[in-house]
Amino acid sequence: MSPGRRPPARPSPLERDLARVEGSYAEVLSSASPPAEPVHQLHRELRALRARARAFRSLLPPARRKAFAAELRRLGRMARRTGELRDRTVIRELLDRPEARRRIPRVTRELAHHLLDQEDAVGLAFLRTYLGSEPRRGSVRRLVDLTRVSTGKVPRWKEALAEELGRKERELDRRFRRAGRRPSVRRLHRLRRALRNLSVLEASAGGTPDPSRRGLSRRRERLQRRLGRLHDLEIFREWVARLPSPGGEDLSLLWRKEERRRLAQIRLALASAPRRR
């Protein structure tokens, strides 16, 4: 390096994550009909990126924070759009399970698969148009630019991450209390989201947690999986309610008992309150 020249700024801690998102983004846009898995991968990466990127807010100068918030909102909308395809994949998988085959008439299941195929075709075409348009296509790259920090501020990243972890811990406590008092679809969904976001941030923090924290993380993961299965069942039941039945009955009612059973399990899990210890 020539004398007097400043060394190049160190990359932002998020740039590796952003590169991963860009790779999945390119894979989805490169095919007229991308397979479900790359879309699902992009969905997971967009959610995780958004959760991690929030920790950067305190590092940015005020002039950048408004644009940064706008890009985070855009990423959230992109994640929701990609999540719609994931939901249809869940419906298809549950529709092919033995209990659905026993309970739903064959002609209705065939119609359901036909409708899912149509929704997938339309949904993928819309998703590619949505993701490929500006300003969405440049959103990830703009986030890279907004989160670049100088070498002197890089150590501050750990402090910013610790602050964000503290906020998410407090938010999780609130979600536990509200869901525990009166579980509902909305409250349990928010609790699941809080668990997921905290897990992403803890993974970003790195290091080896002490044994008590590892146990806490495992309990949270089990609860998150239970909440995820309940969420999938709710999506399936709501979709099945749209299907015509030869006997005229509401097919979604067949899954009410299963939904109540899973909700009872979640209530027991909430009672043990796997929060901080």
Image (cartoon, helix red, strand yellow):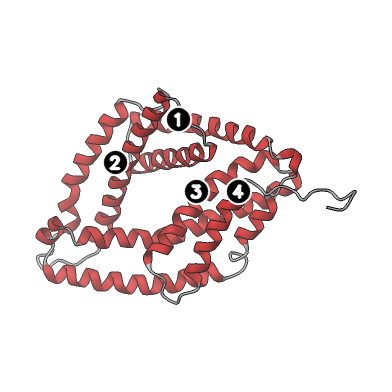
Q: Nearer the viewer, mark 1 or mark 3?
A: 3
Expressed as whole percent of the image width and height from the top left, the position of residue 116 reads 29, 69
Query: Marks 1 and 3, how far apart in space?
Result: 21 Å
In the picture provided, is 92 more to the left or to the right than 64? left
- Taking depth in this image into account, of 237 and 214 the one nearest to the observer is 214
Residue matched to label 3: 48
| Mark 3 neighbour class, 10 Å CA radius: few under 14, some 14 to 19, many 20 or more | many
Residue 183 visible? The answer is yes
Q: Which mark is residue 174?
A: 1
Q: Which mark is residue 226?
A: 2
Q: Which mark is residue 18?
A: none
Query: Marks 4 and 1, how far apart in space?
Result: 28 Å
Which mark sits nearer the N-terminus, 4 or 1? 4
Image marks 4 and 3: residues in contact by CB distance under 8 Å = no
Which mark sits nearer the N-terminus, 2 or 1? 1
Classify residue 118 by image quadrant: bottom left
From this view, report whether residue 118 is shown above or below residue 49: below
Q: Nearer the viewer, mark 2 or mark 1?
A: 2
Kind of residue sitting beneath label 2: Arg
In the picture provided, is 271 more to the left or to the right than 132? left
